[in-house]
Image (tube, helix red, strand yellow):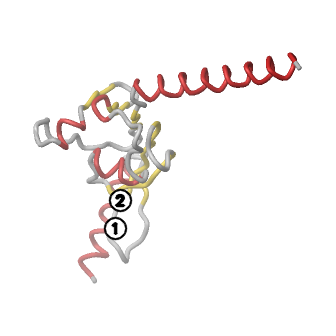
Amino acid sequence: MRVSAVLVITVVFVLYASGFEGYTVPGVENNEILMSIHVWGEVRNPGTHLVPISADLIVGISAAGGPTSKAKLSDVRIVYEDSDIRYDLSRFLDAEGNPVPDLLPGATIHIPIRSSEWWKAAIDLAYKAIIAVNLIWIMTER
């Protein structure tokens, strides 16, 4: 218990010296430092999430509930103030890709929708519009 208290005090001091930018210290009892990230796009729970300081892209996406079935995992973006990283998560999941990148505080992860999903939605909308126009035409002909 004494070592963990010293560890937390040391971490708090280091964070205080760096301005606490992007970090949260949840408490002494769990000895875990969290950072804030943002996850947008095709995930189950988009928004701002707190993840451990040692989190990588997989942990970040998992914090948001994981990708939806419409997610384009081959073009995941990790955006920071001064950089933009593109990562092919689908290749990693097929055991062929590069190692998963670690996250830094304030990271914004964006998972786009697959282009085929956009076309499906457009075709579905056009189909519904044609049916509506057809119904109106039939009703006005009587």
Return the mark for residue 13.
2
Q: Nearer the viewer, residue 82 or 123?
A: 123
Return the mark for residue 9.
1
In the picture, measured across the screen, residue 3 lies left or right of residue 128, that is left
Measured Cα–Cα span from mark 1 to mark 2: 6 Å
SS of the residue at dot 1? helix
- Given the current orientation, which residue lies at the most extreme left position? 96
- Quarter the C terminus occupies: top right
Q: Nearer the viewer, residue 101 or 76?
A: 76
* Residue 100 coordinates in the image, percent (x, y): 20, 42
Question: Which amino acid type is shown beneath numbered disc 1?
Answer: Ile
- Quarter the N terminus occupies: bottom left
- Given the current orientation, which residue lies at the most extreme front position? 142
Mark 2, Cα crowd under 10 Å, few <14 / some 14-19 / many 20+, is few
Residue 84, placed above or below residue 104: above
Q: Residue at x 41, y 41 (%)?
A: 106
Decide: marks 1, 2 in contact (CB < 8 A)?
yes
Return the mark for residue 140.
none
In the picture, measured across the screen, residue 133 lies left or right of residue 36, that is right
Picture mark count: 2
* Residue 23 coordinates in the image, percent (x, y): 41, 52
Question: Which amino acid type is shown beneath numbered disc 2?
Answer: Phe
SS of the residue at dot 2? helix
* Residue 126 coordinates in the image, percent (x, y): 60, 20
Q: Quadrant of residue 138?
A: top right
Mark 1, Cα crowd under 10 Å, few <14 / some 14-19 / many 20+, is few
Residue 23, placed above or below residue 75: below
Q: Residue at x 26, y 47 (%)?
A: 56
Q: Residue at x 43, y 66 (%)?
A: 26
Q: Nearer the viewer, residue 5 or 135?
A: 135
